[in-house]
Image: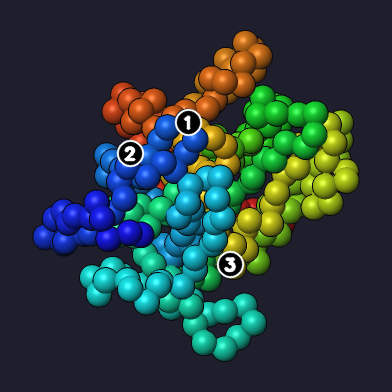
Amino acid sequence: MGGRARHEIEIEGRKVALSNLEKLLYPSGFTKGQVIDYYARVSRFILPHLKDRPVTLVRFPDGVGGEHFYEKAAPKFTPEWVRTFPVPRREGGSRIRYIVIDDPATLVWCANLAALELHPFLHRAPAIGSPTAVVFDLDPGDGTDILTCAEVGFRLKEALEGMRLESFPKVSGSKGIQLYVPLNTPVTYTATRRFARGLAQRMEQEHGDLVVSEMSKSVRKGRVFIDWSQNSDFKTTVAVYSLRAKQDRPYVSLPVKWEELRRAVALGKTEVLYFEPEAALKRVEEFGDLFAAVQERKQKVPDR
């Protein structure tokens, strides 16, 4: 980041340096300053979903068309007031000190690093072995789209309701939909991963023309892959209200109502399920946090 066009703001007593606010990060005309402004304005909605969760920053210093990298370890220049938490490496050895975004100042500081996407774990520190939700990532294969993902989502919702489990959808801000099943009760990743995989396989058995549960991309054509593997202690999932950097426009990973998905399918319009920052902010002011229950609802996955 260049030394020019650099200034400092104060957020809740924390001084945060900002730089290169006019830099274009999305070809559609969305600048770094607008990225920071979005995260500042959505902070009261996104922060409850990031609190106490180690997070991977997906940084795009030259915008969505340039190189990007997943930053797990807090960089050496991280301010002392930014909270971090040590997470063991899968292969052993030293721990990785992940950033934890608990306050508006840390959120804005991360946005200034061009961390367009924020990917938290499914657990909260220090209970890093206990996920607070199960997530199903619905990924459309060739020949399908977000509307096909919605159709699969309806079937998953019905199956979960048969087990007395409530689920909450969000559009990923990319191609698909993610379905969250809040737990907020003691559980292990072994249990949630087994449950997610078993249900994905059941969906494939019952709806083989529409669903696939295997990782191989060669079998996904014309079907939706239910990615159950996100339910792992080493994986992170894009946060609700996070920007995405998959396209030229800054779409948001945003909660939606089931009736909105049904309406979109009925209309056959994919575009109504993509939301840019201003539309996302308007929605949260109108509807509040449609994902609040994911933080609060207590449920248990079946033993088998």
Q: Which mark is residue 233?
A: 3
Mark toward the start of the polypeptide (1 vs 3)? 1
Residue type highlighted by circle 1: Ser
Asked whether the residues under the numbered discs 1 and 2 touch, taking CB atoms below 8 Å apart as contact, a structural biologist would say no
| Visible residue check, residue 186 | no
Residue type highlighted by circle 2: Gln
Kindly report the distance in space between the C-alpha atoms of the residues bearing marks 1 and 3: 36 Å
Mark toward the start of the polypeptide (2 vs 3)? 2
Residue type highlighted by circle 3: Asp
Q: Quadrant of residue 53?
A: bottom left
Residue occupying the point 54% across, 61% down? 69
Kindly report the distance in space between the C-alpha atoms of the residues bearing marks 2 and 3: 33 Å
Instruction: Return the residue at label 2.
Output: 34
User: x and y percent of residue 8 in the render?
Assistant: 17, 56
Kindly report the distance in space between the C-alpha atoms of the residues bearing marks 1 and 2: 12 Å
The secondary element bearing badge 2 is classed as helix
User: x and y percent of residue 276 in the render?
Assistant: 44, 30
| Residue toward you, 118 or 37 | 37
